[in-house]
Amino acid sequence: MDPWQRLETLPPVAEPANSRAAVLIPLYADGDAVRVILTKRPDGMRTHPGDVVFPGGMMENGERPIDAAIREAEEEIALPPEAVVEVLGGLSPLTTRDLDRLIIPVVARIERPAELVADPSEVEVIIEPTLAELLDESQWHTQDWMGHTLWFYQFAEGTLWGATAFMVRELLTYLRGER
């Protein structure tokens, strides 16, 4: 399976008028593997404390989702904008608890710099699993959360769940050729 070829089927990045936030789903080649960059938020954060998430955040006035996602990745993990080699496309816009804030996922191929530096005010740790690890269904489980069935994936550093797990699961459908 060539993951880069499979990801060519991603739709363009959505730009709905009610989008408020964007996340970058940074993918990079590591030998024969492809890795994705996730972060774990510090436990003291006001929103989503301790969650495993993609770099991202609120869009500034007049900012497009792609620009916001790249800016946030630079702020949170010191990913230089020029490291974004190619925007591959987008995943489905979604919301979390705040239904008025539409989140736009931006999938990009990056050239990983020698060092990523976590901004300690926003990132406790950087997590870089391979897509092969995430494709292993035996590592995923579902659980009821407030009347909804959600996906969960446990890393040593923290739990991937909620909106970010939804994005990862959607990305996996493209990698499996199911979309």
Image: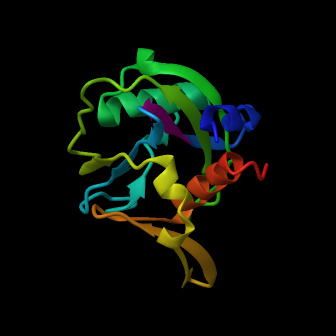
In the rendering, at what x and y percent does residue 151 appear? 56, 71
As drawn, the residue found furthest toward the left would be 120
**Residue stretch rendered in magenta on the structure:** 22-30
Q: Main secondary structure of the magenta part?
A: strand
Viewer-closest of 2 and 96: 2
Q: Quadrant of the N terminus?
A: top right
Vertical side of 41 occupied by 80: above or below: above
Say whether residue 119 is left or right of residue 67: left
Residue 66: quarter of image: top right
In the rendering, at what x and y percent does residue 172 appear? 63, 53
Residue depicted at x 47% and y 27%: 70
Give the image's coloring scheme: rainbow
Viewer-closest of 122 and 144: 144
- Is residue 79 in view from this perspective? yes
In the rendering, at what x and y percent does residue 69 appear? 50, 33
Vertical side of 97 occupied by 27: above or below: above
Say whether residue 14 is left or right of residue 99: right
Q: Based on the picture, tell me whether residue 123 belongs to the magenta stretch.
A: no
Residue depicted at x 55% and y 30%: 108
